[in-house]
Image: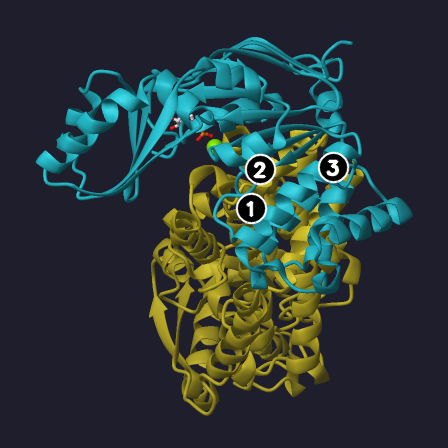
Chain colours: A yellow, B cyan
Amino acid sequence: MRNLFTIAAKDTRIMVRDRAALLVMLAMPLGLIFILGSALGNVGEGDSLDAEVAIVNLDSGDTGERFVDGLTSAEEIDAVFNIHVRDDADKVRTEVERGDLTAALIIPKDLTDRITRGEPAPLEVLQDPGSAVIAGVWAAVVRAGVAQASAQIVAGHTLAEAFAAPLSAGPPSGADASNALPGASHGSPGETQELELDAVRVSELDVELEKEISMISFYAAAMSGMFLLFGGMFGAFSFVRERREQTLARMMSTPSSTAVIVGGKALGVMLIGVLQFLVLLAGTRLLFQVDWGSDVLAVVLVGFAEVLSAAGLAMALAALGKTERAIGGIAPAFIMLFAALGGAMIPAEQLPSWLLPVQVLSPVYWTVESFLELMRGGALADVLPNIGAVTAIGVVLLGFGVWRVRYE
Amino acid sequence: MSSIVEVRALTKRFDELVAVNDVSFSIEEGEVFGLLGPNGAGKTTTISMVSCLIEPTSGTIVVNGHDSAREPGALKAALGVVPQEIALYPTLTAAENLRFWGSMYGLRGDALKSAVADALELAGLADRAKERVEKYSGGMKRRINIAAGILHKPRVLLMDEPTVGIDPQSRNHILETVKDLNAAGMTVLYTSHYMEEVEYLCDRIAIMDHGVIIAEGTLNELRDVVGGMDVVAVKVAGVTSEVLERVRAIEGVEGVESVEDALEVLTRSSGSIMGRLVSTLESEGAHVTSVSVTEPNLESVFLHLTGKSLRD
Ligand SMILES: Nc1ncnc2c1ncn2[C@@H]1O[C@H](COP(=O)(O)OP(=O)(O)O)[C@@H](O)[C@H]1O
Ligand SMILES: [Mg+2]
């Protein structure tokens, strides 16, 4: 059993001396995080936004109409949004889901009735989570509009806060649109936020944007999720090299069992991955001030789970490829595919919807989602299912590898 | 006294090919046992089965009382293996390699330290222990390859062609090492296609060809196989395969082998064939520069039994 660690330590030592491997596993992700994070981080700064939004007014009375007029006539709003007034609520919903519209407001058909009866009336704000910042601005605009309308409707009630809430097009406080990531918001496409047009007060609804993630933080999460898998490629290299150079056969001629030898190799991949992850964590923190969130334990556990997948991938690749050349051909393809599906290249929410069912097969998907969730302030409990998913994928890969791998 | 290695009716098939065919031998404690045969004879396959790396198609192997099928772990613990390939980690130093292989045999702490130091001493590389193995010459790598197999002081050492592709100095060093280990009580199974090594080292020798043991015994017993025969060595240039056939056809010639610029002809009547031999060669356009008669060796035995050279 102790030879498990003897083998893992030996592999780690060999890896640390492998310059090419260090370049791929450490320098490349850090470089990409820096380049992508700073290059894409400044998009949209100073530009006019002209976000496409729609309003569907189903109200049979005239309150809805007045509300629409109020929104469409304000200059500040016009500067930011291209407002389309539409009839078909379902069509608008699909367009928001597809990302064709950034956001929409749907006014219910009984709005006037409810207000007359003094009941709360829900307004529906649809936002494309792929454009969380702009959509959030839209929600804020609508909320401000609601505040004003409430005040008008209930004449005689002074609602200082409502009046004070400006019909401003500026981003909500706390979100820095210039350096914020489109799509960093989690949640399903076409997420609905309901606002209540309360006859007495503006109900405090949670349309606050979640903590925004800077571009560089997004790429820290994404590239870490992706590059941890490269440990799997190097692990597979190590396995086939040992097979070719007969050190594997030599290990098998010692009294150690095959299980210990394979386990030691897998443990080696994990040990190397953990070291890699610690370097990436420290590197992104110190070099790029990336905030991985306050739940350090959860971040580390997510990393461990991804590293387990890397070990599984190593064995699976060693089973599929006979030579380093063959593995060097298939491994990056696998990892890129996992990464693309997992939203490490394009945010997961922006992938076409038909890809969603296969997304769950990518360990990168669960890992990046978890990192982002933790960066936004999530805790271990929020990412436990994801950790479970990554672990399960790793175990399946490992099982396949151990089942199929050849030792000579 | 019962044998420390017992191999009975060992057979290994790779699909159609029978790499090892009904091989039996036993090795007594303290012996150096040689397995001599040309490339492809089945030596490595035999060693791999003895060290439990591949499963025999049939037959039994018992080492130090442990059957390979039932107690492979205990069997392996009694064995040291020096593989034909240099099975070391090139980017680790010699000392790191030895520490790793020692640990794999269960050595820890001070026992490991002193075993590594002893092995480095034995390899004559103590002063270069901290260099990466990739920087070593072929001969030095071979020496560490051997050192890695003896760290745990095995009862039986399997050595598979440990001198292939190295300089004469390293080769001598290795042969002396084997002698020393054996003098210290280690039983050795030594395979080679160099008959001089086997002649020099081994107490008993099995000659193997095409997966079969074709002769077995002490050096003297084997020489008796070609008892009464001589080897006529002819230094000659311009020998073609046609010429070889003509020589083979000469009456009284038991076998012919061509070694670089010489022919070795095995015969019982060197006196009577000498004339025909030279005239045949000359008439075929080959130029004979010298002729001598020597004692037969293992090469001659192999030549006699198979009609071909060990060195092919
Ligand atoms: N894994 C294998 N699969 C198929 N054939 C093999 C395998 N290993 C060895 N052989 C064949 O078995 C024969 C004996 O090989 P080997 O034991 O390596 O001979 P030697 O060590 O005496 O040179 C050769 O013909 C070789 O090609
Ligand atoms: Mg061989």
> The numbered mark 2 sits on a residue in which chain?
B
Give coordinates of residue B200: x percent, y percent.
59, 34
Q: Is residue A381 visible?
A: no
> The numbered mark 1 sits on a residue in which chain?
B
Give coordinates of residue A93: x percent, y percent.
41, 57
| Rendered residue at 75%/9% (across/down) | B2
Do the residues bearing badges 1 and 2 touch, measured as CB atoms within 8 Å?
yes
Label 3 – label 1 distance at C-alpha: 20 Å
Vertical placement of residue B9 versus B124, above or below: above
Front one among A152 and B299: B299
* Furthest residue toward bottom: A46
Q: Which mark is residue B181?
A: 3
Question: Which corner quadrant of the image does residue B151 belong to?
Answer: top right
Label 1: which secondary element: loop
| Rendered residue at 38%/76% (across/down) | A83
Residue picked out by circle 1: B86
Total tally of numbered discs in the picture: 3
Image-based side of A231 in relation to A378, left or right: left
Q: Amino acid at mark 2?
A: Pro
Mark 3 crowdedness (10 Å alpha carbons): few <14, some 14-19, many ≥20: some
Quadrant where the N terminus of chain A lies? top right
Q: Amino acid at mark 3?
A: Leu
Residue picked out by circle 2: B83
Label 2 – label 3 distance at C-alpha: 17 Å
